[in-house]
Image (cartoon, rainbow, N blue to C red):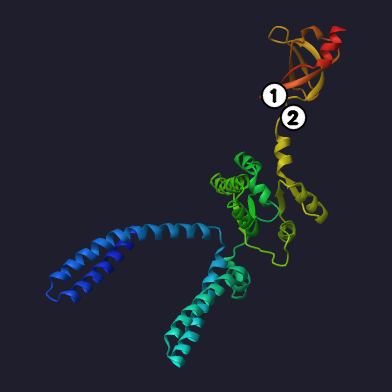
Amino acid sequence: MFVEGFRLIIVLLGALAGYSIGSDSDPSGMAASAGLLLGAGIAYVIGGILGRTADRGLQHGVQLFRNSPPGEIFAAAIISTSGMMAGLVIGLALVAIFRSPYAFVITAALVWVLAGFGWRLGMIKGRQIIRAAGLSRILVPATEPPPGHALLVDGSAIMDRFLMILGRNGLIPGGLVVPQFVLDHVHALATSPDPVVSRRAARGLESIEALRELGVVVSIAPDEIPEVDDPTTKLLTLARRTGLRVGTCSIGVVDAADSWGVTAVNLHTVTTELSPDHLPGEHLEIALVKAGRQPRQAVGYLPDGDMVVVNDAAHLLDQGPVPIIVLSTRPTNQGVMVFARLSPDAQVATTT
């Protein structure tokens, strides 16, 4: 609908332009009608192209502003408009004094520069401006979820798969808080010339939206911490101010948080500990106490009660602890069933 409306405006302009040109060239009226039709036809084609281009530009603009806090947008719009008006006042004064065509160009430049300056200033200092105007309750609502229950995540957490694993399994009940400077950093990495980095960053941005769709509360923290340059220090400063735990996949951030007295959760460690306790290739020792269901199988039990099925080990029943190597694990209603084979050490001991 937007494209067709835009095209209609361009068609009207084209028809008016064609009619005007035709009237000037042939006052009899035939050329004016032909010019009107020709102008409308050309404008119809051009209007469609321009309309679709404008529509894509608007969609891109909405994507850019979707995660921007409303307070910053409001302040940026107000200050940008004020800058535009100041540029017009100064420019019109110059036009009145000098009465030169150059004064109009200078006016346009002043309006553009002051409007751009006002927009950038509003985006940076928006929270302070709306707080001074008494609009904080409306434009900067309290961070949800409340401090202490959410995870304040950094770029490594966003770009890694572990955050998505936890969210998909309902293990982030308190939600996530993503600092704006972290989000900006990941957006920048998504355009990196390194294909691996850009792919991980793009996947991380998509995972944020996927977590929202899964019902995980994702809040954007607009704090920029302008007095600090180091990203890790920025993150820990914000964590200390808000009382939030830090969620990260970086050992460096975990160590720094420990020295700051800030609680940090290593998502890599959490997901690793939630994985099966016994990984393929792990060496164990176990006493085999009964035969298995398949020929030559023997069964033993780990101290926590999990069953271990060992291939080709029936001859070692009741022989005490036997070294084995884990092949795989399978969850069951009673716990985890471990499948294993004899270690080469056990086979050598048997032959001797």
Residue 51 placement (x, y as % from top left): 36, 60
User: In the displayed structure, would residue 246 be above or below residue 320?
Assistant: below
The residue drawn where x is 58% and y is 52% is 191
Q: Which residue is mark 2?
A: 277
Residue at screen point 28% across, 69% down: 13
Q: Of the residues shown, which amino acid type is indicated by label 2? A: Asp
Q: Quadrant of residue 147?
A: bottom right
Relative placement, left or right, of 137 versus 352 is: left
The answer to which image quadrant residue 16 occupies is bottom left
Q: Is residue 112 visible?
A: yes
Q: Secondary structure at mark 1?
A: strand
Q: Earlier in the sequence, mark 1 or mark 2?
A: 2
Q: Residues under labels 1 and 2: Cα distance?
A: 9 Å
Q: Are marks 1 and 2 in contact (CB under 8 Å)?
A: yes
Question: Where 77 sits versus 232, above or below?
Answer: below
Q: Position of residue 282 (x, y in %)?
A: 77, 25
| Residue 258 x/y as whole percent | 81, 51
Q: Which residue is mark 1?
A: 329
Tally of marks = 2
Residue type (three-letter) at the residue carrying disc 1:
Thr
Point 21% across, 71% down: residue: 19
